[in-house]
Amino acid sequence: MPDSSPSVLVIRLDAIGDALALTPMLAALAERAIPVDLVLRGVNARIFSERAAREVFTAPFALRSSTRENRAAIAAFGRELRSRAYTHVLVATEDPGGYRLARAVNAPVRVGFTNGWGKPFKTIWAHLLLTRTVVRSAGLDPRAPHECEVLFELARPLLGDARPTRDAARLRPFVLDREPTRGDAVALQVSDKWERLGIAFHEVAAAIRACGEIAPLRLIASTSEPAYADRIARATGIAVERFDELEPWKEAIASARALVAPDSGAIHVAGMVGTPTVAVFPPIVDFALQSSRWLPWAAPSRVVRADEGWPQRAADALREFAPS
């Protein structure tokens, strides 16, 4: 353990929901007045509030690339960060670039994941770059820990026996820069993520119609997915709000009476700010383990398996959060 006061760099090179799983760790570090900087991707660099980190860096290198040019970019970025004299680097990603960056920063304590005998060569390689490791299963852990709990273990040298909070009132300020006014409408995410999860368009439209019978709906989408939003608007006759920035999108979720969404970043925003959520997961083989790992963390939630009849089950679950 370094003699100096802790200063932490956290590397998370993943999607929006993955980044938000850091929130309980960030809250715990903040409560101990431990300064934190973050390295995120461009897609999730604005997902946290200004309170969450002292500074947020966008990784200036490609993921899953071991080219000479990419490794040089990682090394140069590491030299730039080294002047900040971090005592701890927490590698909260499986991407090799995160491990290489931690070594380039060369903090006294570098903590990251290994997969034990599940991936023995990667484990050996990671031990060469890190000073401390946390073993996580190479596949889905049969103990079904939530991703927030897994990431929290990276900060164990700094947090002692603390546990990740599930109090949304404590987590909400790390996601929102300002407090929106609570509305009466239910937010429903319109995204081609539904189709990418194998959930048919006509079923999503049916779920929208069923949920609309329970409460007024606010359909929310990204401007980056206009085709899917247009199709939904035509099929349901309901206008879809388009967002090109994360802050108003987050506020739409935080101000909603409840949220209905697929397994996506939206349910993790809701999970951290306390918005009740109906989370729809695809009917995969490891449904129970996958949904346990990624269900909304600190908000009331109901998980719906997207097999036959799921639109009505989603509406029935919504009725618990938005009774007529």
Image: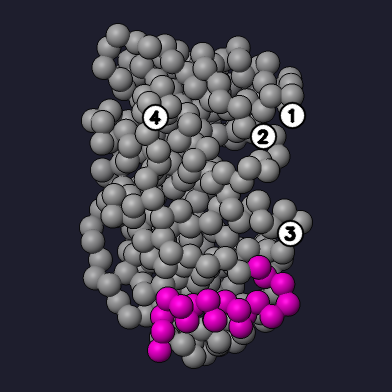
Pointer 3: what residue?
284
Pointer 4: what residue?
161
Residue drawn 46% across the image and 87% down it: 214
Q: Farthest residue in the top direction?
A: 3
- Depth order, front residue of 43/281: 281
Q: Nearer the viewer, mark 4 or mark 2?
A: 4
The reply to whether dot 1 and dot 2 touch (C-beta < 8 Å) is yes
Residue 324 visible to an observer of this rendering: yes
Residue 300 vs residue 130: left or right? Answer: left
Q: CA distance from mark 1 to mark 3?
A: 22 Å
Residue 245 vs residue 151: left or right? Answer: left
In the image, residue 270 above or below residue 8: below
Secondary structure under the numbered disc 2 in the rendered image: loop
Dividing the picture into quarters, in which one does residue 66 lie?
A: top right
Is residue 310 magenta-colored?
A: yes
Is residue 293 magenta-colored?
A: no
Q: CA distance from mark 4 to mark 1?
A: 27 Å
| Region rendered in magenta | 305-324
